[in-house]
Image: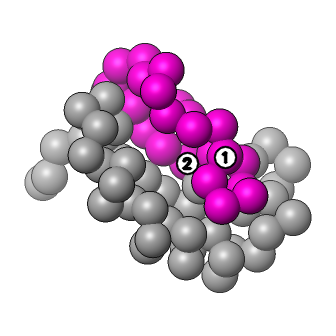
Amino acid sequence: MATEREIRSLKKRVSGLLMKNRAVSAVGVERDEKGHYVLTVHLVDDAPDLPAELEGHAVRYVRRGRYEKQ
């Protein structure tokens, strides 16, 4: 189980690469249904070419649509 600090560090390392994928609208650190910290990737569309885990940490994908700056 990863700490919040570990997942935030992972996010800093991989966000730029993930955001290059057109299907990705946001990358965040959230808690899963068990309360563990996970890297969550928000998608506009399905993206079958994205990895199930990064650097040994599971990645959660959520289809939410595009986020807009306000």
In the rendered image, residue 47, in percent from the top left (x then y), is placed at: 43, 23
Q: Is residue 64 visible?
A: no
Q: Of label 1 and label 2, which has the lower sequence position?
A: 2
Label 1 vs label 2: CA separation? Answer: 11 Å
| Figure quadrant of residue 30 | bottom right
Left or right of 32 on screen, residue 55: left
Point 39% across, 60% down: residue: 15
Point 24% across, 32% down: residue: 22
12, above or below 27, in the image: below
- Quadrant showing the N terminus: bottom right
Left or right of 54 on screen, residue 56: right
In the rendered image, residue 68, in percent from the top left (x then y), is placed at: 17, 43
Instruction: Assess whether mark 2 and mark 1 are in contact (beta carbons under 8 angstroms).
Output: no
Return the residue nearer the eye: 7 or 30: 7
What's the amino acid at mark 1?
Glu
34, above or below 22, in the image: below
**Which label sits on residue 40?**
2
Magenta segment boundaries in residue numbering: 40-65
What's the amino acid at mark 2?
Thr
Q: Is residue 58 visible?
A: yes
User: Few, some or many C-alpha atoms within 10 Å of disc 2 (few <14, some 14-19, many ≥20)?
Assistant: many
Q: Which residue is mark 1?
A: 53
